[in-house]
Amino acid sequence: MRELRQIIIAPLITEKTTGQKFANNSYTFRVSTNANKIEIRKAVEKIFNVTVLEVNTINTRGKNKRMGRYSGKRPDWKKAIVKLKDGDSIAEFEA
């Protein structure tokens, strides 16, 4: 198994994810593109000491960008929406 911090890259904090936190007790993370749901579940449970009920993953394509005549592409990435058991929360998101 890979290092836990290689699977969970960073939390995503936006208006939409904050609303999901209060409505569904769901937290959103940017994860490794080759991580599966089982690895994500185990990593979140071990890192934050919570109980995960459900994991949904979304592969997001990187956008094509231009700077004058030069064009490029942002990298593809993956996000995971993790639903926790009622009563559990992640303190890092509460700040």
Image (cartoon, rainbow, N blue to C red):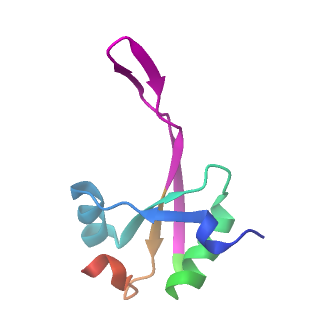
What is the residue that sits farthest to the top in this orientation?
A: 69
Number of numbered discs: 0
Query: Residue 7, relative to residue 73: is it above or below?
Result: below
Foreground pick, 22 / 9: 9
Position of residue 23 measured from the top left corner of the image (x, y, whole percent): 26, 68
Q: Position of residue 77 (x, y in %)?
A: 52, 44
Question: Residue 80: percent from the left, percent from the top?
Answer: 50, 58
- Where's the C terminus, which quadrant? bottom left
The residue nearer to you, when weighing 42 against 8, is 8
Answer above or below: position of 85 versus 30.
below
Q: Quadrant of the N terminus?
A: bottom right
Q: Eyeballing the image, is 91 above or below 78?
A: below
Relative to 32, is 10 on the left or the right?
Answer: left
Is residue 60 a member of the stretch shown in magenta? Answer: yes
Residue 11 position within the rendered picture, expressed as x and y whole percent measured from the top left: 41, 65
Say if 16 sits above or below 63 in the image: below
- Which of 54/48 is in front? 48
Q: Residue at x 25, y 65 (%)?
A: 18
Q: Is residue 10 left or right of residue 8?
A: left
Quarter location, residue 67: top left
Q: Observer-nearest residue: 37 or 9? A: 9
State the extent of the magenta-drawn residues as a range: 53-79
Q: Residue furthest right?
A: 1
Q: Is residue 14 magenta?
A: no
Residue 22 occupies which quadrant of the picture?
bottom left
Please identify the dominant SS of the magenta region: strand
